[in-house]
Image: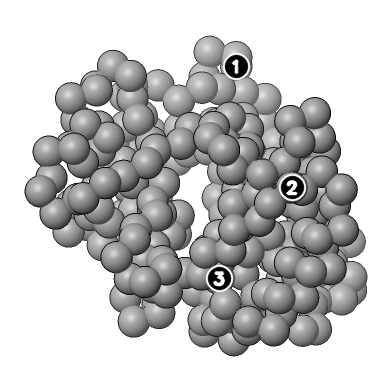
Amino acid sequence: MAARDDVSWVSITSGGAEIVCVAFTDPTHEDGSVLTRLPRTRQVLSFTAFAVLHMHVSSSEAKWMPFDKPLTSAQVSVLNGGDSPRPTAPSVPRDKRAIRPDDAPLIAELARDGRAGVVALARATGWPQSRVSARLTELLTSGAVHVTTDLAPGLFGFHATAYLWLTVTPGDLHQTGQALSLHPEATFTAALTGTANLLVTVTCRDLAALYDFVTTKVGPLPAVRQVEIVPVLHRLKQGGTRVRDGRLSILTSGA
């Protein structure tokens, strides 16, 4: 599962025989979808699929914070260039703001290694460096492509990751999901199809911190009718990156 390009998250949970994964399906290529392969895989005894209806994206201030002492405003200012004015982003024509089919090799290489420079990207795509530089600027400036930082939580002392499957009153689903997404422990919050209509992935230092999150931040929400806590025993892939011995590992596609 982790070797598939259309699967971005793979975790072993519960008693070790359950796998939770996030897969992206393309309606135009149903035959190649992981959902069509699972029923024909003899090792799979059963599976359940849910569709993500809505993802709750929190502000940057509410992002998961692995450090007890975050950077001060002055330190952040230094990293951002101090008082120096930031260059104005060039205007991108409307027809160049979306990802095009011919961007596929560039996007694939960026997904494999988001730190790759223009020279490496040109070598991997076979494009001239000038084309890579120009197209990359267009995609990043327009917001069609963005760069995020991924971390291995265990290396920062966070060893309790769990999926919280919540059953929430439908009329309060959006408000509840938005409220939970604002907590730094919540690394992913989304409304789903199924009986448990809200999924919250939380990352805490230990089980005591997980217990505190459930009892003090989830429990008081009046619309929450039921909570199932599913601990993650082992993560094989996160955000499209393979995990080996607790560390993120950049691998070639299909490895």
Residue 235 % position (x, y)? 39, 68
Q: Quadrant of residue 204?
A: bottom right
Residue 18 lies left or right of residue 174; in this view the side is: left
Label 1: few (<14), some or many (≥20) within 10 Å? few
Find numbered disc 3 in the image and state the secondary structure of the residue it sits on: strand
Gap between marks 2 and 3 measured at Cα: 22 Å
Q: Position of residue 25 (x, y in %)?
A: 35, 30
> 23 or 216: nearer the eye?
216
Estimate how packed mark 2 is, as few (under 14), some (14 to 19) or many (20 or more) residues with alpha carbons within 10 Å: few
Tell me the residue that label 1 is attached to: 93
- Which tag, 2 or 1, sits closer to the chain's start? 1
Query: What residue is shown with label 3?
Result: 161
> Could you give the CA–CA distance between mark 3 and mark 1, rounded to whole angstroms?
42 Å
Inspect this view and state whether residue 37 appears.
yes
Q: Are marks 3 and 1 in contact (CB under 8 Å)?
A: no
Residue receiving disc 2: 225
